[in-house]
Each structure stands twice: as C-alpha cells, then as structure tokens.
Amino acid sequence: MGDLLNAADKVGNYQIAAVSDVYGPRRDAIKQRSNGIATTHANYHEVLQQEIDAVIIAAPDHWHVRMAVDALAAGKDVYLEKPVTHTIEEGATLAHAVRSSNRILQCGMQQRSWSHFRDAVDLIQGGSLGRVTQVRTYWWQNYAAAGPHKPVDTQALDWKQWLGGAPDQPFNEEKFYRWRWFSDFGGGAMTDLFTHWIDVVHWAMKSDQPREAHMLADKYIFEQWDCPDTVQAAVRYPSFDVVYEGMMASSIDDGGLEFRGTEATLKLNRSGFGVYREGVLGKDNPVVRAESFRDGTISHMQNFFDCIKTRKEPNASVETGIAAARAGQIVNLAYRRGGQIAWPPKTPV
C-alpha cells in the first residue's frame, strides 16, 4: 500500500478519507499519513458505507475479488493490486462484477502506463523485431537478506478476519508477513512477479491464451513455504513460447524480459530497453535505446484518477488483469500436477 500511496501523493489532488486494516498499527500509520483526517476501521465494509469516490485494494490475494466485488456493488471505483484473482474460477466473478457496473476498475499492472513499456510494445507490434517466437522473462529477489520480521502485536491483530475465507489455522508470523508464498493466500513467484511480465507479453504479442505450461521448481532455501523459491517455467502460446526463471535468495540482475525475433531482440526492464539487430556488432548495436525517468506506478495512478473523472476505460482493464493472473495460476497447476499441464486441461483442475 505504501508504494501506491507514494504514487498517489506525486499525482496529487486526492485525500485519504478512510482506511481499513485488520492490524491496528497499519491503520494508525495511514491515519497519521492523512494528517489525522482518515477514519480507521477493522472491517472494510464500514469504509464502503462512506461517501467516497474510490478505493485502493492492496490486501492479500485471497481477499482481492471479494473486496473488489463489494466495492463495485457499493458504487466505488477501484484500484485493485495484482494478481487481481487468487484462483482461475474467480476471473468470471470479477469480470461480471466490473462489466455489469458503471464503475472504473484499474488493475495494478503499471507497465501498461509506463512510457518506455508502451514504446517497446509499439516497436514489437510494428514488426521491428521480425517474427518473435520466444520471450524470456526473469526476476530474482533476495528475501534471505531482509533480516528478521518486526514482532507482531497479536493483541492488535484480528487474525480470524485476516484469514477470511481461507482455512482456519493458528497465527503464524511468516504467513502474516510473507503470505504471497503460501497457497491459501497467494501464489508465489508466478502470481507475484511473473504476472507483471506475462501481462507485457500478452499486450505486445496480442495473445493471452496459453496451450500448455511446464514448471521445474523446488524449495531449496525457504522450506517452510508452500510455494517454491527456485523456479524455471515455460508457457506455450499458439505461435510463441515464454520462459521464466528466478529465485528468492539472489537478486543480481533483478527482473526483465527479452523479446527474441528473427530480425532483432528487444531487452526490456523497468529502467528502459534496448533493441539489438541481428548481424550488427560493436558500437552500432543497440540501434534503439530508451530510458525511463519516471516510475510507471505514478503514471498508472494518474491514469486511474483521470478515468474516475472521464469515465474512460483504464489502461489495465479487468480482462488484462484476469489473463495475467490466470497464466501464473496455470503454471502453478502444472507444478502441482507433476510439472506440466495442457490448457484447457483434459481432466478437472
């Protein structure tokens, strides 16, 4: 939530009217950020009863669709963090809720508003790379370097409400802080990190329906997690393949994508991109380079605020968010089914 509010601060012309969190210290931090203006609530339904224009939802993944549907029904516009769904089945529920309302829903796929990502997509769709048959994606992070968690004041936490529709279980500090890596609440690297990159692939390649997925993964470092910390995955689309690799105890090289075409390769990350021509060596390669000087999350929040006023479709529609989440969820299904799955599957998931 902090990063989103930082982006909103840079856009300006908004006010935090209310905050809901089941953990008291987090409610208090946002109230302080609002200069004491915001009302605080443990139950998000109390926020939805207020006369406010929009809500930002940055809860754990298993709450996303339920909160978004309730917010839309209450007449609020919504900025919904990625992945917008926790399960494949939730996609239809969320899409129906958005399209049967007259409300705005911006998915937290900020690359859709990031200037150099938009330029890169234009180059790819314009044929500058020739025929693209493989996209490589990667993201390395180091959770091992983060150090110990700050102790949780369990007296200030409504753990039962935090769990929501997840199976009942005792409080666990690792689950509270690193919920993304437990399947009751998140989907690991494939829905946290890969979701961002596969959305760019869907956008650039104009294709979002995978045919099969493969995943080679293990828990080498964080054995207490449900989701693997070391991943190599591949997803096949009708005319191209996408590969992903990453681990959670090494951050060198961070994250990015490579679109490999018959005429050129485009290497892209959140800092910028370069286009490298086949057969060109030395100082003349790359032939195109772009850098980013503004965090795309700011532009994405600006687009959301603009759409609240204009009622135009936001840059990251509900369908794009659902497709990006679904791709990572399909790969996770492959992992649970021995490493591979055809899509649609021949047997029920």
Image (cartoon, rainbow, N blue to C red):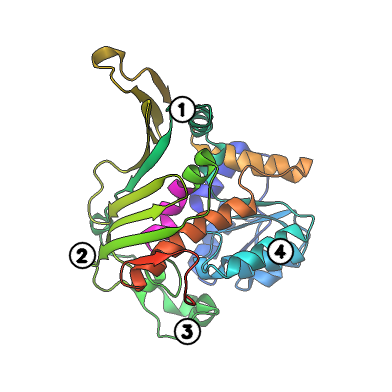
The kind of secondary structure the magenta stretch mainly shows is helix
The mark closer to the camera, 1 or 4, is 4
Q: Residue at horizontal 29%, vertical 65%? A: 228
Answer left or right for 136 relative to 43: left
Residue 96 marker: 4
Q: Amino acid at mark 1?
A: Phe
Report how far apart the C-alphas of labels 2 and 4 lie in the structure: 40 Å
> Where are the magenta residues, as a range?
188-198
Instruction: Identify residue type, mark 4.
Output: His
Separation of marks 4 and 3 at Cα, in angstroms: 26 Å
Question: Residue 76 sits in which quadrant?
Answer: bottom right
Q: Secondary structure at mark 4?
A: helix
Sequence-wise, which precedes: disc 3 or disc 2?
Answer: 3
Q: Badge 1 local density, few (<14 within 10 Å), some, or many (20+)?
A: few
| Circles 3 and 1 in contact, beta carbons < 8 Å | no
Q: Position of residue 33 (x, y in %)?
A: 56, 52
Rendered position, 238 above or below 188: above
